[in-house]
Image (cartoon, rainbow, N blue to C red):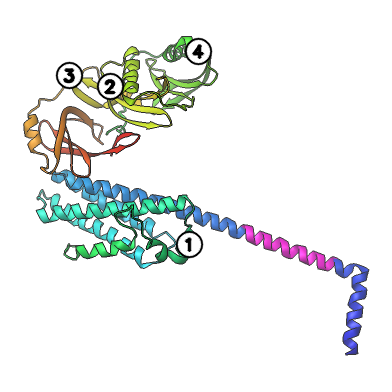
Amino acid sequence: MGKIKDKIYDWKDRLRGGKMLTLVVTLVVIIIALMVYAYKTSRAYRQLAENSYNHAFYQLIEYVDDTEKLLAKSTISYSSEHATENFSNINKETALAQAYLSRLPIETQELENTQKFLHQVGDYCYTLSKKTVKGEELSQEELDNLTQLHQHSVNLRNVLYQLEADLFSDTIKWGELEDAGSKIFSREDETLTQSSFGNIEDELHQYSGLIYDGAYSEGLDNTEQLGLTGDDINQEKAQEIAKQFVGEDKVEEINFTEESQNANIQCYNFNIKTKNKEENYSISVSKKGGHVVNMNCDRQVTDESMSAENAVNIGKEFLQNREYKDMKETYYMKENGILTVNYAYNQDNVIMYPDLIKVKIALDNGEILGLESTRYLNSHKEKRELKEVKITEEKARQLINPKLEITGTDLAIIPTEWNTEIMCWEIKGRTEENDFLVYINVETGEEEDILMIINTPNGTLTT
């Protein structure tokens, strides 16, 4: 007992001397520093994991969305060749969806059933592709199965959209899904046809009988650049063209920035300051021929007092005044008070989808805020040699799946992935759920392509 007291007194003496106090303080500081470092490291890892999960989830949504659209097209396709392409793409999209689904931090029966559903869709379509590649027609039962698969893919997509909304609003977090996934996924939401991943399991029972063996605004660039006509110009000439295109009365100052290559087109680039201090333009003029390739204004639009129809007509008049003749509006999108319209060249009442110009119109005063003409410059011909229409409009209508209610027809030239062009009947139609464009070759009657029309509150798109 006496020895213990001696040690305590000795420790007190050392502490009074300051040596022990320094040591204790140092140890405490080191421990706190290590804890802070560990916390920051852990937090960084958690953020990295969160970013990885977010990426996987948004990729999953993209591939499920693509699968749903391809299935919808498959339900109305009458072309063996086109059906084979659709089925092959579905098989690829579902495989990618499964891969990203497996990266999510959830191990529940619900996700296993979703994996099973995606696998079944992919396998079934792969089996159908082996049939259609031989030119064989699908049976009515197989077409009915595709219709059912499409509906369930819509349900799955809606579940993912709801989950995306919950994640975005911080209603749930990935950590919660990892710890209690099944409880979260089983929540009921009356706004959805299907309320959870778990409901996919019930739907899959409907497929116990499935037995199997195992618009063109994104067209390709034409390297010939058929619309890039005229002689080479110098920087001074390009600058004058840029000023005239924007409107000389609006320009206060124009500055050359650089020469660049825009989608294989050599350009002079300029910045334009206008007399209205709230807006400035960037504009690119091609070295060959002095064509405006791009123009963009940075003005913000806060009011929408103009209808889309009026804006479309203003855009068409703008193109006409700048010698883009015979342009016809196709599809458009409205965003942040700006209407973006795709105009296609029209020759003898035939729509030339390769010759597209994109125009941005402000919905407050109709001002032209942007233009992009790369596709037009790559593909435009003043006069194409049109194919003989061997398949009449009436015959083309008969070649369409009868479940499609036809609402209109046009003649059109569409681009292919091989940088060629095909003249087709463009047949607009709808089913109970979706609107479509079907393209029938005017010479052979073959179904060349199907596009789904996406109608949104902000405009009309195709996919």
Give the residue pinned by disc 3. Answer: 348
Residue 207: x %, y % from top left: 20, 62
The Cα atoms of the two marked residues, 4 and 1, are separated by: 56 Å
Q: Secondary structure at mark 4?
A: strand
Give the residue pinned by disc 4.
251
The crowding category of the residue bearing disc 3, from other C-alpha atoms within 10 Å (few below 14, some 14 to 19, many at least 20), is few
Q: Position of residue 462 (x, y in %)?
A: 28, 37
Measured as percent of width and height from the top left, residue 213 is found at 17, 62
Q: CA distance from mark 1 to mark 3?
A: 61 Å
Residue range in magenta is 22-40
Q: Nearer the viewer, mark 2 or mark 4?
A: 4
Nearer the observer: mark 1 or 3; the answer is 1
Q: Give the residue pinned by disc 2.
A: 380
Q: Amino acid at mark 4?
A: Val
Residue 93 higher or lower than 394, as above or below = below
Dot 3 or dot 4: first in sequence order is 4
**Magenta-colored segment: predominant secondary structure:** helix
